[in-house]
Amino acid sequence: HRLDDRTVTELKVLIERFPGESQVFLHIGEDKVLRLPDQFCCDVTGGLVGELRVLLGPGALV
């Protein structure tokens, strides 16, 4: 899934709505992984995962 500026902004807002302890990693291309700073740690037990699937597509989450 390609991220345009609008999707990146929506992703940031979404992650900030679910603060927590889980680190966020973005897989870029085939072999790059970017760990987001601690300020973007999130709670994956709430509705975040479902909203991420809507935003990024069902196959975008690992």
Image (cartoon, helix red, strand yellow):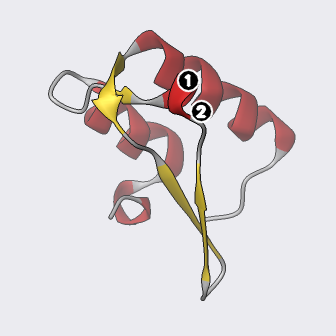
Q: Nearer the viewer, mark 1 or mark 2?
A: 1
The residue drawn where x is 28% and y is 35% is 50
| Vertical comparison of 9 with 2: above or below | above
The C terminus sits in image quarter: bottom left
* Callout 1 crowding tier (Cα within 10 Å): few <14, some 14–19, many ≥20: few
Nearest the viewer among 19 and 60 is: 19
Name the quadrant containing residue 13: top right
- Name the residue type under label 2: Leu
Q: Is residue 40 left or right of residue 43?
A: right
Q: From the image, tell me which residue sits under label 2.
A: 11
The residue drawn where x is 37% and y is 16% is 18
| Vertical comparison of 25 with 16: above or below | below
Q: From the image, tell me which residue sits under label 1.
A: 39
Label 1 – label 2 distance at C-alpha: 14 Å
Q: Secondary structure at mark 1?
A: helix
The residue positioned farthest toward the bottom in the image shown: 30
The residue positioned farthest toward the right in the image shown: 5
The residue drawn where x is 18% and y is 21% is 46
Q: Secondary structure at mark 2?
A: helix
Q: Is residue 57 left or right of residue 3?
A: left
The N terminus sits in image quarter: bottom right
Nearest the viewer among 58 and 25 is: 25
Name the quadrant containing residue 43: top left
Q: Is residue 10 left or right of residue 56?
A: right
Disc 1 + disc 2, Cβ < 8 Å: no
- Name the residue type under label 1: Gln
| Residue 14 locus on image (x, y percent) | 51, 22
| Vertical comparison of 9 with 4: above or below | above
Name the quadrant containing residue 42: top left
Q: How many marks?
A: 2
* Callout 2 crowding tier (Cα within 10 Å): few <14, some 14–19, many ≥20: some
Q: Is residue 40 left or right of residue 1?
A: left
